Amino acid sequence: MSTITQRANERISKRTQYGVREYAAETDGVVLYWNNASERWQTENLVKKGTRIKLDSNEILLPLYKGETVTDVAKVIHNFAVLPLFKYSFESRYLKKGG
């Protein structure tokens, strides 16, 4: 498993409560959001170090280290864990049964 995937999955696993949270980017990074319709993570926008941002419960801020780029994230994003809030939701069970 890549370090990008490990870092993303660590942050994803903490998304177990609803609500908006505010963060200050410790380093340059990328905001990812969970899309229920496609059941996958997608990239949203780049964030510069020091920027204060608000993230909803389906979003994470993934730091980029050592020359990593959004392209590097895109190459492994399909390996990221399912958002826990979706995984255990009524919507997830409903979609798996074929609506």
Image: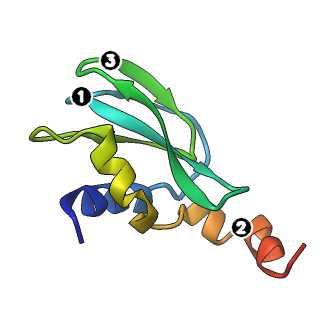
Check the picture and name the quadrant holding the N terminus: bottom left
Mark 1, Cα crowd under 10 Å, few <14 / some 14-19 / many 20+, is some
Q: Element at badge 3?
A: loop
Q: Indicate the amino acid at tag 2.
A: Ser
At 83% from the left edge and 82% from the top edge, which residue is drawn?
Answer: 97
Please name which of the two marks, 1 or 2, marks the residue nearer to the observer.
1
Q: Residue tagged by mark 1?
A: 28
| Badge 1 or badge 2: first in the primary sequence | 1
Q: Element under label 2?
A: loop
Disc 2 marks which residue?
89
Residue 92, x across and y down, in percent = 73, 70
Kindly report the distance in space between the C-alpha atoms of the residues bearing marks 1 and 2.
32 Å
Choose between 69 and 86: the one closer to the eye: 69
The structure's colour scheme is rainbow
Q: Position of residue 93 (x, y in %)?
A: 77, 76
At label 1, the amino acid type is: Asp
